[in-house]
Every structure is written in C-alpha cells, then in structure tokens.
Amino acid sequence: MNNELTFLGTGTSQGIPVIACTCKTCTSKDPKDKRLRTSVHLSWRGMSIVIDSGPDFRYQMLRAGITKLDALLITHEHNDHIIGIDDIRPFNFRQGGEMPVYANKNVSENLINRFAYIFQQNPYPGAPKINLNTINSEDLLTLNGQTIIPIALNHGITSSFGYKFDSLAYLTDMKTLQEGELKKLKGTETLIINCLRLEPHFSHLNLDEALDFIAEIQPKKTYLTHISHRFGTYESIKKMLPPNVFQAYDGLKIEF
Ligand SMILES: [Zn+2]
Ligand SMILES: [Zn+2]
Ligand SMILES: [Zn+2]
C-alpha cells in the first residue's frame, strides 16, 4: 500500500485570504490561492496521522473527509499550530478513549498551560481526552511499531519539530536546523519546507534561503508550504521555482 500525504493547509498564520486585505493574492479567484493554516494528513503504514491542529482543524478534517485519527503530532506551540485542538472531541466520541498527542517538552508544557481545562484533575464531561506524550529529538518516535524521526529546528526565538517518515521529511516553521540534525535528513526524497515569502523573515525561510537549503539536502522533489499572501499568487510564484520545486496548495495529495 502506498503512503499518501494530503496538504490540509498551506498558508502562514493569518491564512489566505487575509481578513480585509485587498492585495492581488487575497483577491485571486484561483482556488490554489485559498490557503488554510499549515497542517498535513498522512496515511502512513496503515495509520492516519495529522500534524498540527491549528484554527482551521475542524474544517480541515471535514474537507478532507478524515473519519479516523490514530495520532496527532505537534510541531510547536504557535497559535496557528495548536489552537484547534479542542476539536479532537468528535474523534474521542467516535473512536472511544484518548487521542494520542506527541509534542516536545516545551510544547507539552505550553499545551497544559493554555488548555488547563483539558489536563486538569477532573475535567468536565465532554472535554477533549488527550494522552499527551512528551518526545525529544534524541529518541525516535515509535507509533504502532513504526519509526518516525523527530528533527529539532530553530524557529526564531523558539524551536520547532520536524518529522521524517521513511524518505519524506516535513519541516514547517523553521529558520535553520539545530546543530547535529542535518544527518537525519540523509536519504530524503520528498522534502516539505516552509517558505514564507521573498523578503527575509526572522523565524521562517524566504525563497533564497529555501533554495539554498534544498541544494544542500538534494531531495528528488520539494514542496513549499506556510506561504504568506506577500509571496504572491500561485501562478506568479510558480514562475520563480526551479524544476522539482513545487508550491504545495490546499488539497494537494502526494505519494511517498
Ligand atoms: Zn506557523
Ligand atoms: Zn493580501
Ligand atoms: Zn511558528
């Protein structure tokens, strides 16, 4: 069985269109210029996995027709990656039991603080049921006997986790790799990285930096995600990309 990844959202933290913005990207009629907040779904080795639960999580589950979820992996604590976690509840009700959630120590602490009502001693009936597993970048993450490699990333003043599934690496919200992490990307055939816009940004890759990074890793194919309206329309960005580098867009499915 082939493994498949679906882009559930490919926009930066405000999404595209941005509220009240009248720029060319935000007013574009092209469906590829409608970008929810960044998230992906993987059908991988018989499991259904989502990475991040941002503000659009509910609609993303509905739109992609996801009826079963085995695990939620979190990259980092920024609002556009976690704030929709309450909508895990329909999976709790449907599947029974707690949803396994995986995050690093900093993110776990953040979730417990920000969603105190989920993690308190006696949560109210109907509150989300989450089995929070703290992971680190020194160890492998094992799900159902299958191995995922967490990759530690620098993301401005905070850090973020990327995840590698076989030869696919998903690295959103990064500026640089943390020291010693490069070797984990050996053998990457499909690379997914954040690429915000043309101008530099303190916590995200811009296009020049993304292209340098791709040249270093040398994957067969790369997909750019976490795209800002300031980058431009899908059609205008397409013209700037070399062969084998593509923009992700919402709903795009790739096999790996
Ligand atoms: Zn983000
Ligand atoms: Zn705009
Ligand atoms: Zn972020």
Image (spheres, rainbow, N blue to C red):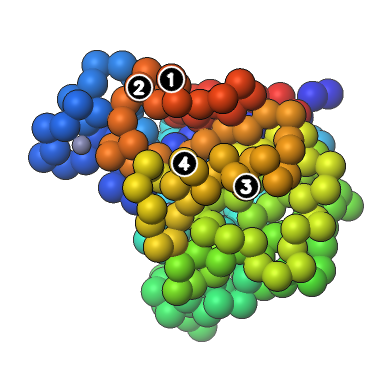
Using the rendered view, name the quadrant where residue 101 is placed. bottom right
Residue indicated by mark 4: 207
In this rendered view, identify the residue nearer to me: 224 or 255. Answer: 224
Q: Residue at x 45, y 55 (%)?
A: 204
Mark 3 residue CB less than 8 A from any atom of ligand 3: no
Query: Label 3: how many residues lie within 10 Å, few (<14), some (14-19) or many (20+)?
Result: some
State the count of labels.
4
Extreme residue in the right direction: 145
Residue 67 in the image: x percent, y percent?
A: 57, 33
**Comes first in the chain, label 1 or label 3:** 3
Q: Residue at x 58, y 60 (%)?
A: 176
Q: Secondary structure at mark 3?
A: helix
Amino acid type, callout 2: Ser
Which label sits on residue 14? none
> From the viewer's perspective, is 139 left or right of 103?
right
Residue indicated by mark 3: 213
Query: Label 2: how many residues lie within 10 Å, few (<14), some (14-19) or many (20+)?
Result: few
Q: Is residue 226 visible?
A: no
